[in-house]
Amino acid sequence: MIDTDKYEGHTPAPWDWFPTPNDSHIGHLQRHSNLTRVTAEIKSRSAEDDANAALIADAPLLLEEVKRLRGRLRDAEDLLVSCGYCRECFWDRESIEDIADEVRSTSSLAIWPTGFTPLCEPCMLLFKEKVVGLE
Ligand SMILES: [Zn+2]
């Protein structure tokens, strides 16, 4: 996971890039003044360089999007956990127990069936206990 704390204090958006005949400058624009802070220069001009300049200039926007999406993901995980799903593997106890019952009826081996997303370690322990009948 990217540690976004290391970006604290960066030059705020909007950033833009400015092509010149021989290079590109990436910088911060203040729309209502002539202030331009050049953050980077790309010393050649090709379609790839232009795309790189555009990507770098969008860095503040991409950072905000990462933060927004992490928040949304955290909210979704919290909702799943509040509904009984495991935060690590996103299986719910009832489904694990149902699968364990099915496995126990056909085999004495506590092996998680292939084709299912894997269980985290605590959920695998629950599954194995259920299959061997400890619970
Ligand atoms: Zn789990």
Image: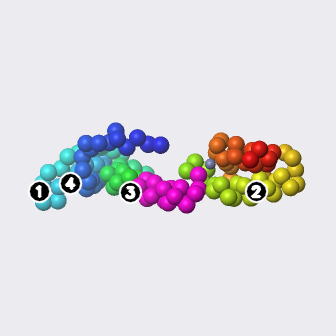
- Secondary structure at badge 1 equals loop
Q: Are marks 2 and 4 in contact (CB under 8 Å)?
A: no
- Residue with the mark numbered 2: 99
Q: Where are the magenta residues, as a range?
A: 68-86
Structural distance between the alpha carbons of marks 3 and 4:
23 Å
The picture places residue 13, in percent across and down from the top left corner, at: 26, 54
Q: Nearer the viewer, mark 2 or mark 4?
A: 2
Residue at 45 percent of width and 54 percent of height: 74
Farthest residue, direction top: 6
Mark carried by residue 33: 1
**Magenta residue check for 73:** yes
Find the distance from the CA under tag 1 to the CA under tag 4: 8 Å
Does the magenta run of residues contain 110?
no
Secondary structure beneath dot 4 equals strand
- Callout 2 touching callout 3 (CB < 8 Å): no
Residue 59 in the image: x percent, y percent? 35, 50
